[in-house]
């Protein structure tokens, strides 16, 4: 089985020490994601999200934080943090495999961009909730409900689904390149391959999609633990 040889590999093909700060950021980003992923899963199991627009309005009146969490606030933070990990992987892997690494980082950036576009409802629903319950006429309430329904349609629409699948392709491509790179233990790309394949089924396709997306949290968490360990070891080598 292939084992990582960080010290040897970095000495033979040293990474520019000026990347050290980015490695630090990526390492701590992975740690934060390790903390956020279980919290995210537990919240959705213990307290399922509302199934109606009015349910979201009422939830935001009871707890803005819970409303934001059920509209993927934590996942949005995850998407921002994972970008730092993507850039580190691109810097390292592109030394030996430029083409696939470049395709992976492009797909990763596109995935995150589409995701951010789809999450307009996350914070906009706060204002719409207040507007609905402060409305003085039935027409205002109907208009507010219609606006919220549109946001939720975008929230669960094509942008999110495409973003989710592209994220799977990103991890898959990076993992394939890792398999040929001595810097990484086999456990990292193998876990990444499992995670990437599971992400080909977005949670928006129905109940099966929801269950598969929940199942994907397991390899995702393991992958983050492995990547964070590798990142901290790499940072240690860069500081020597």
Image: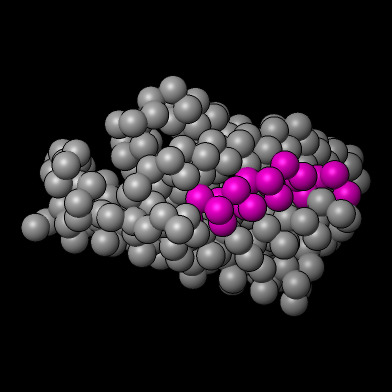
The range drawn in magenta is 188-206
Left or right: 133, with 5 as reference point:
right
Q: Residue at x 52, y 40 (%)?
A: 176
> Residue 84 appears at what percent x and percent y?
38, 45
> Residue 71 appears at what percent x and percent y?
68, 54
For this orientation, the residue located farthest to the bottom is: 46
Hey, which quadrant is residue 205 in on the image? top right
Q: Is residue 229 visible?
A: yes
Hey, which quadrant is residue 121 in on the image? top right
> Residue 138 appears at what percent x and percent y?
90, 46
Residue 105 shown in magenta: no
Quarter of the rendering occupied by the N terminus: bottom left
Left or right: 23, with 240 as reference point:
right
27 vs 44: above or below: above
For this orientation, the residue located farthest to the front is: 1
Left or right: 225, with 26 as reference point:
right
Q: Is residue 160 visible?
A: no
> Residue 86 appears at what percent x and percent y?
42, 41
Q: Residue at x 41, y 55 (%)?
A: 2
């Amino acid at each position: 089985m292939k084992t990582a040889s960080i010290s040897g590999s970095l000495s033979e093909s040293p990474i520019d020490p000026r990347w050290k700060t980015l490695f630090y950021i990526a390492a701590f980003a992975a740690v934060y994601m390790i903390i956020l992923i279980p919290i995210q899963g537990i919240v959705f199991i213990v307290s399922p999200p509302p199934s109606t627009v009015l349910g979201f309005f009422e939830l935001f009146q009871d707890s803005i934080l819970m409303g934001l969490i059920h509209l993927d606030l934590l996942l949005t933070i995850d998407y921002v943090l994972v970008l730092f990990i993507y850039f580190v992987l691109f810097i390292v892997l592109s030394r030996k495999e430029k083409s696939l690494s470049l395709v992976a980082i492009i797909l990763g950036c596109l995935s995150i961009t589409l995701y951010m576009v789809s999450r307009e409802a996350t914070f906009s629903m706060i204002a719409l909730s207040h507007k609905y319950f402060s409305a003085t006429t039935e027409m205002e309430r109907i208009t507010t409900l219609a606006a919220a329904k549109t946001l939720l349609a975008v929230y669960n629409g094509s942008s999110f689904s495409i973003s989710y699948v592209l994220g799977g392709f990103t991890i898959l491509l990076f993992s394939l390149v890792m398999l040929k790179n001595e810097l990484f233990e086999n456990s990292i790309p193998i876990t990444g391959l499992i995670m990437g394949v599971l992400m080909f089924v977005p949670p928006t396709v129905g109940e099966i999609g929801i269950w598969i997306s929940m199942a994907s949290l397991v390899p995702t968490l393991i992958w983050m633990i492995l990547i964070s360990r590798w990142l901290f070891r790499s940072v240690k080598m860069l500081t020597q």
